[in-house]
Image: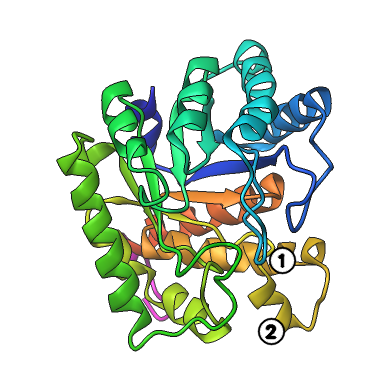
Amino acid sequence: MFAEIMQRPRPLIMGILNVTPDSFSDGGLFSDPERALLHAQDMVRQGADLIDVGAESTRPGAFPTSAAEQIARIVPVIEALRHSIQGDILISLDTSLAEVAAAGLDAGASIINDITAGRGDPGLLNLAAESGAPVVLMHMQGTPRTMQDSPHYRDVVEEVLGFLLERAAAAQAAGIPREHIILDPGIGFGKRQSDNLVLLANLNRFTATGYATLLGTSRKRFMGAICNEASPRELVSATVATSALGVMAGVKLFRVHDIRENRQALDVAYAIKQASSIGNGLPTYGD
């Protein structure tokens, strides 16, 4: 099913479902499996193509969550999602631990979303290869606990891109097919505001690699600094601006909290991009 969904022409939305008590924007809202299920169903109705279930907060300063605790949080939710969500909706599991990923895949998840790009647990890439699960490889400088202490780059685009290509090569060496690898530049993960902006201005460098690219800017605090807005929940409009820019750069997957607003932005941006390919054949003023 993953291949069929990725072949859809329009951009895809990965809806965020955090079953955590402490995530930066929605911590505690969906830790109850019944509430999590209702929210996931609502995201599907609004246009989500995938649901990304996370059991560990990765906000700046967060401490790690044990494998046992992550499994206890995610398995009931993934099982409920798999049995209740209709249609071709994929479930992604946001974890860097092979033990958690294995439990999630057994419960019904199809994709592994790893913020450490396979560095957090050497067994994760092997598990993805053996199970046939596609994997998202994200760039992060440091760990969630330390990543915003003092991030620094000489050339953020070259360094992030080089890291992701190296991790993609490691994934392929482990036996993961190229078409099952998705790259994520990790906006907000060990980056200054200027680094995030430069990466967003150069998304075409990542999409030009031939790997599918995922963009995750949803409600990120660097946009709040620009907009003079302290509440992450008030950054929906800022998020959809980056989503539209991502479409024009060729990004395929968008990981967001606010589905309806981003679905509209992605569909309009995609229509404009399609029109641009035939722009020379359109009538112009004065014809």
The residue to which callout 2 is attached is 226
Work out which quarter of the rendered image holds the C terminus and state it: bottom left
Instruction: Give residue 185's position: percent from left, percent from top.
Output: 41, 63
Mark 2 near mark 1, Cβ–Cβ under 8 Å?
no
Q: How is the image coloured?
A: rainbow
Q: Where, by quadrant of the figure, is residue 239 drawn? A: bottom right
Tell me which secondary structure the magenta stretch mostly adopts. Answer: loop
The answer to whether residue 258 is left or right of residue 15 is right
The residue to which callout 1 is attached is 237
Q: Is residue 275 magenta?
A: no
Label 2: few (<14), some (14–19) or many (≥20) C-alpha neighbours in 10 Å: few
**Residue at left offset 54%, top offset 25%:** 89
Q: Which residues are magenta?
A: 278-287
Q: Where, by quadrant of the figure, is residue 45 drawn? A: top right
**Residue at left offset 75%, top offset 25%:** 37
Instruction: Give residue 100's position: percent from left, percent from top.
Output: 52, 31
The answer to whether residue 262 is left or right of residue 198 is right
Note whether residue 129 is visible.
Answer: yes
In the rendered view, tell whether residue 101 sits above or below residue 182: above
The answer to whether residue 188 is left or right of residue 184 is right
Circle 2: residue type: Ile
